Amino acid sequence: QITLKESGPTLVKPTQTLTLTCTFSGFSLSTNGVGVGWIRQPPGKALEWLAIIYWNGDEYYWPSLKDRLTITKDTSKNQVVLTMTNMDPVDTATYYCAQRRLFFDSWGQGILVSVSS
Amino acid sequence: EIVLTQSPASLSLSPGERATLSCRASQSIRSLIAWYQQKPGQPPRLLIYDASNRATGIPARFSGSGSGTDFSLAISSLEPEDFAVYYCQQRSSWPLTFGQGTRLEI
């Protein structure tokens, strides 16, 4: 059974850096073709893909956020970490991590991150 | 960036009726599209991948079709648990993009 769980702060101040951790089980990020991505969803709005990292270390980012995002993996700990710098109230959203083979097959429950002073 | 436009934005139907949701891509994405279902307070669930393949455990009343730029998700006979928001997503090119969603309501 595949599970993913997001953890991190639920409230950050504007200009701060957000660090979210995705801890997963039931699969290995060293398996050929597997990736773990981050997707966010502002309240009442649509899904927005942010970043993904693959088994071979390849990383991809949403272009307009590329300068603010970093995704890393720790295969031994079954974790993927997303950092987003210079947080703004418009970044308030539920942040999901998900396993990707072809598409996002399995998702975590998400973590609601609010940005407010 | 490939833009996915879903229509209608909302659809009001009754249990037992057939639903047809559309997703149009701003350029050809071959068949590299997925459909997700999202209920309130829950993460999305993968329904259909590569346009017409049902994901594991998805009932046969869900079907997907299309290629190129025009795609559809059909639900043959709506069950009460099918009322949710549906998103399409493409994997043809970077960045990965989602549609804005269709809300299926009673």
Image: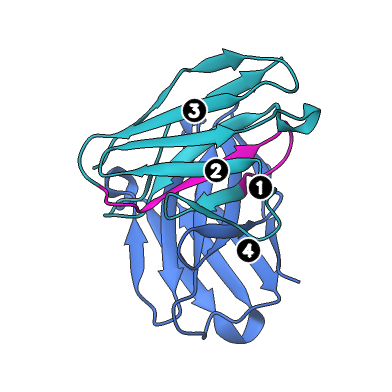
In which chain is the residue bearing label 3? B
Cα gap from disc 3 to disc 2, whole angstroms: 11 Å
Letter of the chain in cyan: B
Q: Are marks 2 and 1 in contact (CB under 8 Å)?
A: yes
**Secondary structure category for the residue under label 2:** strand
Q: Position of residue A36 (x, y in %)?
A: 52, 66
Q: Colour of chain A?
A: blue
Residue B60: which disc? 1
Q: Are marks 3 and 4 on the same chain?
A: no
Cα gap from disc 2 to disc 1, whole angstroms: 7 Å
- Magenta span contains residue B34: yes
Q: Residues within 10 Å of mark 3 (few under 14, many from 20)?
A: many
Residue picked out by circle 2: B63
Q: Nearer the viewer, mark 2 or mark 4?
A: 2
In which chain is the residue bearing label 2? B
In which chain is the residue bearing label 1? B
Residue picked out by circle 3: B21
Q: Are marks 3 and 4 in contact (CB under 8 Å)?
A: no
Residue picked out by circle 4: A22
Highlighted magenta segment, given as a residue range = B29-45
Q: Residue at x 42, y 49 (%)?
A: B51
Q: Amino acid at mark 3?
A: Leu
Q: Nearer the viewer, mark 3 or mark 4?
A: 3
